[in-house]
Image (cartoon, rainbow, N blue to C red):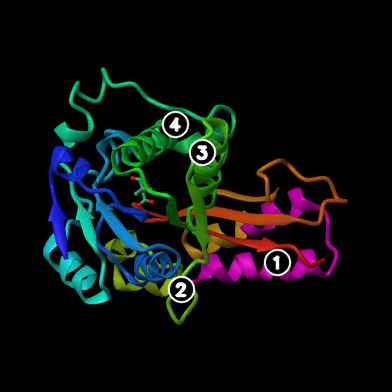
Amino acid sequence: MQIITSISELRKLNTTTALVPTMGNLHAGHLSLIKQAKSVAEKVIVSIFVNPLQFAPTEDFTTYPRTFEQDCEQLEQIGVDLVFTPKITDIYPNGMDASTYVQVPNLSNILCGISRPIFFKGVITVVNILFNILQPNKALFGEKDYQQLFLIKRMVKDLFMPIEIIGMPIVRETDGLAMSSRNNYLTTEQRATAPILFQTINNIKQKLQAGERNFAELEQQTITKLITAGFTPDYFKIYRTDLIIPTPKDNKLVILAAANLGSTRLIDNCQVSSL
Ligand code: PAF
């Protein structure tokens, strides 16, 4: 396995690749993306870059878990060809404030974009930069970050980028909690409560499949349940899979939730298509 830290060294390579962009602290969710990447491309690149542009000053940029050595051991074992781990100054040579950025309008300002107004600007910009540097043919992202994946697909389409974006199913713990690096922040008590988020999503999925269509009431009931369970909900929404507010006739739906347990933000979602 080769590790490259400079863009000029990287430019000397010329291979067909799939990219799995990450912020490190790899778990089974990341590994599922990498396994799939290996099956759809000749060479697999994993980028590890904790992107400061997508964190608000109040968020966990400095404390975000950085486990480079362990990550590399896992990547070596799974047979990744190349790990790209640039410095902040490589990605933003003019400084973050002066750098060109990329933004997907409207859809960046709903759901997670309301409480995290700079998040998608940071994500879309860094993904764009990574695509330009690494020039992959394919890139893989987890469906846990449904809105992120949707916006990346939109950017690639809008900017005519010759890259296939592949979304991969959420990988869950045995009790249903969606895997995330931030799960490590949870106390024992919070960890025991955390699976309730997915349980409430499943519960609403069943109600939608049974034909219930009062979306606002279902959303509000669930918010109340989450508060009672100890969460501070950010949102619990039923949208069309294309992130438009649905009418009762729509049948391709996605349930999206974000809620805090203490200071840890959890997100999850589930698509409901067979009604
Ligand atoms: O999902 C993530 O880990 C990050 O948002 C990403 C896509 C690697 C961009 O920094």
- When the figure is inspected, residue 176 is found, relative to residue 49, above or below; the finding is below
SS at mark 1 in the image = helix
Q: Which of marks 1 and 2 is nearer the N terminus?
A: 2
Q: How far apart are marks 1 and 2 (CA)?
A: 17 Å
| Quadrant hosting residue 19 | bottom left
- The residue segment tinted magenta is 194-222
Query: Is residue 254 positioned above or below 157 on the image?
Result: below
Residue topped by disc 4: 117
Q: Distance between the residues labelled 1 and 3?
A: 30 Å
Considering only order in the chain, which callout, 3 or 1, is on the residue closer to the N terminus?
3
| Image-based side of 272 in relation to 269, left or right | right
Q: In terms of secondary structure, where does tag 3 sit?
A: helix
Q: In the image, 25: left or right of 255?
A: left
Q: Specify the quadrant that holds the N terminus.
A: bottom left
Q: Do the residues labelled 2 and 3 touch (CB within 8 Å)?
A: no
In the rendered view, would you say 212 is above or below 132? below
> In the rendered structure, are the residues bearing label 1 and label 3 in contact, judged by CB atoms less than 8 Å apart?
no
> Label 4 CB, ligand 1: below 8 Å?
no
Residue 9 appears at what percent x and percent y? Answer: 14, 43
Mark 1 highlights which residue? Answer: 205
Cα–Cα span, label 4 and label 1: 28 Å
Near mark 4 (Cα within 10 A), the count class, few <14, some 14-19 or many ≥20, is some
Quadrant in which the C terminus appears = bottom right
Name the residue carrying label 2. 172
Spatial distance from mark 2 to mark 3, Cα to Cα? 28 Å
Residue 145: numbered disc: none
Q: Which amino acid does label 3 sit on?
A: Val
